Amino acid sequence: MGKILEIKGVTKYFGEQQVLDELDFSLDEPKVLALVAPNGTGKTTLLNSIANIDQIDEGTIRVFDQPHTDYQLFYKMSYLQDSSILYGHLTGWDHLEFVRKEQGKSKEELQQLILDLDIGTYMKKKVKHYSLGMKQHLLLAIALINQPALLLMDEPLNGLDPDSIIKVRTIIRSLASKGVSMIISSHNLDEIEKVTDNVVFLYEGKLIEKEEVMIDAIEYTIVLKEVEKALSFLSRIDVTCTKLSDYKFVGTFSKQQFSVFRSFCKEQEIELFDCQVTHGQLETIYFNLYEKNSEAQYDI
Amino acid sequence: MIFEWKKWSKNPKNILLVSLALLSVFVSLANLYDKNQEADQAVFEHLKAINDEIDPPQGYSGPSENYKLLLLLDEHGELPSSKERALQKILIDIVYLLEDEHTAQLEKKWTKKTTIQTNRLKLQQKYLDLGGEPWRSETNIAEQLARNQWLLERKIPVVELEIGQQGFYFVYYLLNHWMNFLIVIMIGLLFFDFLTSECERKNYLFMAVQPVSQKRFFKRKYIVALSIFIGGLITLLVLGFVVASIFHGTGSLIYPVSIYQGTTVKLIPLWLFLLKTISLQLLFISFTLSFLLLLSKWLKNALEVLGIFLVIMFVPILIEKLLPKIQAINAYLPFFYMDLSPKIAGGSGNVSSSFLTQLAILISWNLILALVWRLNWKEKKR
């Protein structure tokens, strides 16, 4: 079996600004892949490029060993976009019927999908009267009619209430268990961690796998007895700290700084009651990758 | 295509415009009724004008040139020869017939009126043939005579076709007057955002991720737009016909319409005239829609599309009014096919092409646009 997705040397400009920079990536086996980056750094552009909505300036993209420009790919690939693509004056059923016919699926298959997603109650209503969650479920139904082997999802959890998030998350897991490959763009790191371990970061126009990110600094929440003494020492070795209480502070340490601080505590016999990494692993990587470059322009 | 139709038909703007178009049919009918109310007066004024050319008022002592009866007399007030006497008799007979014709008009006895009018026209023609002075208020006697002959042979009462209220005549009115420029404006208003609103609102992305080629996508839009417009047009015409027929009868499909070919006049039945008009109109609509959609594909902004479309369609017409020399080429350009009446009926002196040539010209322009579409798809293949 060939590759599910192969991106080679893809470059994309918006005017003068380069959004994708000779980007290489391949997806060889079915998996759920999270695409993480701050807003406006090119996540949607990358997904749009794969779906051939945005034309790339250089490089090639192949999906299931076919050029991504082949519109017939949409028989086995779906793209869940944001709800602005829906027609407010049409009903959910109108949208689904159109896609069903284009995909050559039967009415029974569509009815089953509506039952599975439990969206039947509002399908006859006009989309303009839908809540964000309802729209998201409709988009999901639209994307699933063709029973895709590859599903691109652009911020599928954006703006959803907790109930809807749980429901969408369950659907994603269920699809993954059936062998559907998914590329999910998001900046909701907590949610991504609950769905997949496979994370790539879009950074300066290139994709970086989670494991490749060099973590320069980690934020710790530390509880100890002599906070003032510790803070005074930490300021001397350039660690940025915030005091939370008489016994607690947070500080961002490099590996070396943290090692020096541990030695200092040992020498001074300062008892450490607790010392935890403040953020999850993804968040830490995210902060290391992007926050240090927050002055970079993310206005795409 | 059903989806395209749903998108269009559920758009409140389109519902409003279609309602206005339907309403305007009734407004036209009411307008015609008003014009007909004034028609008796217009006929009376026309007959009086002919009478005034012949007969001077009592006690008139001015120059003889103003009145045909005085013109025949010599300086002693006598008729100098048998020719003048014959002409005088004709003129007096015409005066009596004018009175009878007016009475028939008032009594709405149309067949009687046609007979009297035919006799009067024959006398007017005879007057000219005998060397009488040309008629100032009646210039198309031969044409009218031919028409009346046609009507009498087929026992059809004479009507003023331009303001006829009967079913078929109302359809003629709608096609020739009411729809001329309205067609372009309606196409513009109904379809200027057919593509662009989707681009502006990003709805097109919904279609873009389905297994639909760009060619099929645009083809559907074009076919749906064409079907909607032609369907709407036929609905309006049928509605107009039915409503007018209920109140005033159907009229006759073989009512003669004058066709000018150079200096000669030919009469063709109304059904043939309508058929020609509708054929050219369908081709013109097809061209216009295709052109509008092409413009929408290039411009991507709804109001820009509407503005530029209307300018491109109407500016040549305005230029034609300012620069009459352009009339020589107007038969070959599609923009000038909004007003089909002079194209088919002639009369304005600028028609150099036959109906078949006009048909061929419009088909060619449709093919040219089809070719442009084709090239466009090749350039931007998905």
Image: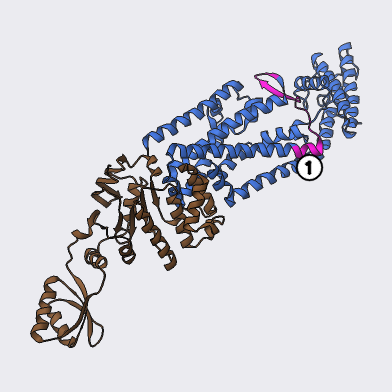
Chain colours: A brown, B blue
Question: Which residue of the protein is positioned furthest toward the left in this rendering?
Answer: A267
What residue type is disc 1 on?
Asp
Q: Residue at x 47, y 57 (%)?
A: A117
Assign the N terminus of chain A to one quadrant of the image.
top left
Q: Is residue B24 left or right of residue A74?
A: right
Q: Write down the residue under mark 1.
A: B34
| Segment tinted magenta in the rendering | B242-265
Quadrant for the C terminus of chain A in the image:
bottom left
Q: Where does the image place residue B142, in percent across and percent down from the top left?
A: 76, 19
Q: Residue furthest front?
A: A177
Location of residue B162 (image quadrant) = top right
**Side of A82 where B141 appears, left or right:** right
The question of residue B263 being in magenta is answered with: yes
User: What's the residue at 49%, 63% (across, down)?
Assistant: A131
Asked if B45 appears above or below B95 in the picture, the reply is below
Residue visible at 70% across and 42% down in the picture: B25
Question: Mark 1, chain letter?
Answer: B
Quarter of image, res B136:
top right
Q: Which is nearer the eye, A81 or B313? A: A81
Q: Residue at x 27, y 45 (%)?
A: A6
Task: Verify whether residue A300 appears in magenta.
Answer: no
In the rendering, at what x and y percent does residue B260 appear?
A: 67, 22
Residue B254 vs A132, above or below: the answer is above
